[in-house]
Image (tube, rainbow, N blue to C red):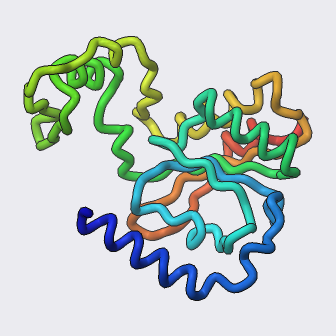
Amino acid sequence: MSKVVNEVISANADYVANFGDKGNLPMPPGRQFAILTCMDARLDPAKYAGLAEGDAHVIRNAGGRASDDAIRSLVISYKLLGTKEWFVIHHTDCGMETFNNEIMGDLLSSSLKTASVDASGWHDCNAGGGTTDGKYIEWLTISDQAKSVLADVQRIRNNSMVPGDIPIYGYIYDCKSGSLVEVPEATEAGKPV
């Protein structure tokens, strides 16, 4: 076993020892809201939004983008599990700002191994065995955080499966301060209709 596997299993044993009555939590989130945010390891939605187990749905992906799958999850969160408000929360210093579709497609066509980045940009190890499939995906990269939050709120709001009466709020998490900074245009676009 790897060191990481051992650490995870050990941490889980500690968690189980103090699990208490969490096994009795209901499936619907108790505070009836959902957050769509980035998978970045520096973000801890439980801490920045004051969540405990059972409070809210947290949907995470690269960039916290309103992909088809994220919207699918939000619709399930509302339709089957009763959430009444949604937050789209992107963040400063996001890795999705460091590349575009072309760069990702080129990196994947060189090899499937991990790439590296430095001041001059992204570099591949050129180990071979790449794929051209990455050239046909919209990677939902970010060039402007506020604009991407607005675009994602609009994409969610304009989806035919999303009810008009659910408010959608737009925020950017500041990685340097821990603050949530509202994107007023996004929250305006997410107002119930």
Horizontal side, residue 144 vs residue 70: left or right: left
The quadrant holding residue 186 is top right
Q: Is residue 84 visible?
A: no
Horizontal side, residue 25 vs residue 147: left or right: right
- Most foreground residue, 177 or 124: 124
- Most foreground residue, 91 or 74: 74
**Residue shown at 64%/68% (left/top)?**
49
- Most foreground residue, 135 or 174: 135
The quadrant holding residue 129 is top left
Which quadrant of the figure contains the N terminus?
A: bottom left
Q: How many marks?
A: 0
**Residue shown at 82%/41% (left/top)?**
191
Give the vertical position of 134 relative to 152 (above or below).
above
Q: Is residue 125 visible?
A: yes
Which quadrant of the figure contains the C terminus?
A: top right
Horizontal side, residue 153 vs residue 178: left or right: right
**Residue shown at 78%/40% (left/top)?**
76
The quadrant holding residue 29 is bottom right
Q: Position of residue 172 (x, y in %)?
A: 54, 52
Q: Position of residue 63 (x, y in %)?
A: 47, 42
**Residue shown at 47%/61% (left/top)?**
43
Give the vertical position of 82 relative to 174 (above or below).
above
Q: Position of residue 67 (x, y in %)?
A: 58, 30
Horizontal side, residue 155 vs residue 98: left or right: right
- Most foreground residue, 186 or 25: 25
